[in-house]
Amino acid sequence: MDLILLEVYIYTFLVSSSSSSSSSSINSSNSYVSPRREIFTLWMKSLVYHGNGCTVYDSKGQIVYRIDNYNIKRSKEVHLMDSNGRVLFSIRNRKVPVFGHWDGYKWSYDEVTSKELPWFQVKKIHKVRRGDNMSYYNVILGCNSEASSYNIILGTTSIKIVNQTGKLVAEVKQKQASSGVLFGNDVLTLVVEPHVDHSLVMALVTVCGLIHHRI
């Protein structure tokens, strides 16, 4: 069997075999908010030409999000798409002297959302924390004010997204089998809490992938 097809088969099997661990699957509608906790599997590879990117599966093994970055890493702009290839968010790296940030542009196919103005911004919090190997980022929604809507706590192998009160709304960590064995570094689990827009969460996870040069 071709190596690429073999890897696709293996990872599809992995995510489909873990379907019992999630409360529900994604609806076929355009709603990205669920009343239940959602669990996704992230494979940090693109299925297009086995290139750079990310493929996201729901608990039933269905592809729900994808990023196809082909043979380019550290790109200044990537596109988060749904399973049909429709762009949901464009993420742009805005490098400026000393400080940089990432802009997220939400695509709308009914002309409700502007592609010219960022829908969210991610900015690093430049604070020194002793004994803390984490990096901290502010997420500003709407970009019309400096009020932070979420915070990202970014570690080497983990991501936590919390709201303004510090409550966890989403978490990414290395995928673990029921036996306790960890999968490879390119296989991750994303848990999104109820009533949270998981398309936005995936856009923020994409920013983290760009920060770590994994996409």
Image: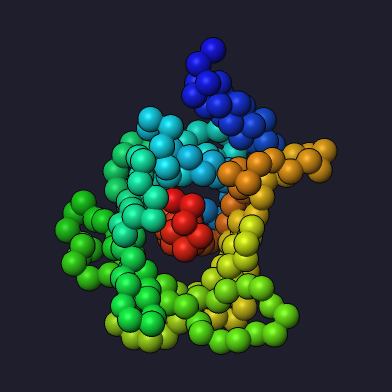
Residue 13 sits above or below residue 166 on the image: above
Q: Residue at x 73, y 80 (%)?
A: 131
Residue 139 position in % (x across, y down): 44, 74
Residue 10 sits above or below residue 214 on the image: above
Do we see residue 194 in this rendering? yes
For this rendering, which residue is in front, 17 or 188?
Answer: 188
Q: Residue at x 50, y 33 (%)?
A: 62
In the displayed structure image, the side of residue 141 where residue 112 appears, left or right: left
For this rendering, which residue is in front, 35 or 65?
Answer: 65
Residue 134 sits above or below residue 187 on the image: below
Quadrant in which residue 169 is drawn: bottom right
Residue 6 position in % (x across, y down): 55, 21
Quadrant in which residue 49 is drawn: top left
Residue 177 sits above or below residue 213 on the image: above
Give the position of the N terminus as an image quadrant: top right
For the view shown, which residue lies furthest in the right direction? 179
For the view shown, which residue lies furthest in the top direction? 1
Quadrant in which residue 21 is drawn: top right
For the view shown, which residue lies furthest in the front direction? 97
Q: Residue at x 44, y 59 (%)?
A: 210
Do we see residue 29 in this rendering? no
For this rendering, which residue is in front, 142 or 212?
Answer: 212
Residue 125 position in % (x across, y down): 50, 82
Residue 10 position in % (x across, y down): 60, 26
Number of marks present in the image shown: 0
